[in-house]
Amino acid sequence: MSYAGDLTPQEAWDKLEQGAILVDVRTEGEWAHIGIPETKATENDPLFIQWTFPGGIPNPDFINDLNQQAPEDRSTELVFLCRSGQRSIAAAIAATQAGFTSYNVLEGFEGDPDRFGERTVNGWKNRGLPTNLGKI
């Protein structure tokens, strides 16, 4: 594994309570229409940095954006989140290569689709973790 590891949504929340920072790598459209994780109960606000743009176009400035928004102290752990836990793996790998301690959130924000295609099975919001459906 080329990053620090995978976390369940609850384990990710526990890391955030211990001082880690959540990095949501979904698209602006996902943040606006689906909601965002709410981290007010922790000491850090989440970072919102798109890993890809709509249509799957990679964000060429991802690491630059991360360097600008993340703490200069590279000992602060980063927890990466996307819709289902796939883009966040790639983001965690890239961040690790840039010198950050990076984790991926399994299941992502929305989780896996059920038999009808609805994302109601698991994931951050379906596990009852703090969520702001009112967007950023």
Image (cartoon, helix red, strand yellow):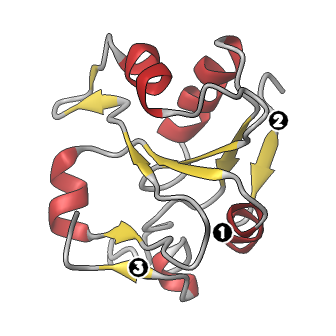
Residue under the image location 16 percent in, 34 percent down: 54
Marked residue nearer the N-terminal end (1 or 2): 2
The image quarter in which residue 31 lies: bottom left
Q: Which residue is mark 3?
A: 131
Q: Which residue is mark 1?
A: 9
Mark in the foreground, 1 or 3: 3
Marked residue nearer the N-terminal end (3 or 2): 2
Q: Which residue is mark 2?
A: 4
The secondary structure type at the circle numbered 1 is: helix
Residue under the image location 61 percent in, 25 percent down: 72
Verify CB contact (< 8 Å) between mark 1 and mark 3: no
Verify CB contact (< 8 Å) between mark 1 and mark 2: no
- Amino acid type at circle 1 is Pro
Depth order, front residue of 111/69: 69
Give the quarter of the figure containing the C terminus. Answer: bottom left
Residue 121 sits above or below residue 19 on the image: below
Crowding at mark 3 (Cα within 10 Å: few <14, some 14-19, many 20+) = some
Instruction: Specify whether 97 is left or right of 35.
Output: right
